[in-house]
Amino acid sequence: MATYVILSRFSPEAFTEPKDFIKLAHAVSSRIKKECKGVTWKQSFATLGRFDVVDIVEAGDSKDIEKAAMIIRSHGHSITETLVATPWKEFLAAL
């Protein structure tokens, strides 16, 4: 399984009240769990700065990650950037 980092930034239209985000987050999460069975969520972080959320996920097929990112974009009204993350020791061993 490969590890991916999904960086998300909410659009101003995503929600009007902070409490509304909870509903949106549950809806997006439920849809991804239902439609992207090959994706395993490892951890999520709220961040300050350029991105609002950093998700660490694993998947055996990049197509599952692509679909999850598109669900976040469309249903969650977000901009995403997805990165493949190689464990440091594996990266050094490949050099």
Image (spheres, helix red, strand yellow):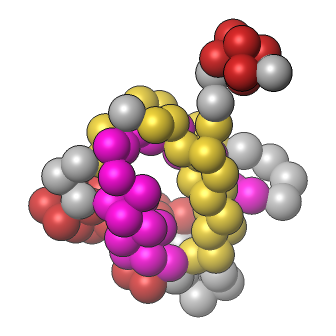
Query: In this rendering, does residue 76 appear at all?
Result: no
Q: Position of residue 49 (x, y in %)?
A: 85, 53
Which residues, given as a range, are shown in magenta?
51-73
Residue at 65% across, 51% down: 83
Q: Quadrant of the C terminus?
A: top right
Specify whether residue 58 is in view: yes
List the single residue furthest toward the left. Answer: 34
| Lateral position of residue 39 relative to residue 46, left or right | left
The verdict on residue 79 being magenta is no
Q: Quadrant of residue 65?
A: bottom left
Q: Position of residue 39 (x, y in %)?
A: 30, 47
The x, y position of residue 32, in whole percent, is 27, 61
- Is residue 20 shown above or below 34? below
* Image quarter of the N terminus: top left
Q: Is residue 69 located in the magenta-colored stretch of the structure?
A: yes
Residue 10 lies left or right of residue 70; in this view the side is right
| Residue plotted at (62% across, 68% down) | 80
75 or 81: nearer the viewer: 81
Horizontal side of 40 relative to 95 (left or right) equals left
Q: Is residue 14 above or below residue 4?
A: below
Residue 85 coordinates in the image, percent (x, y): 63, 37
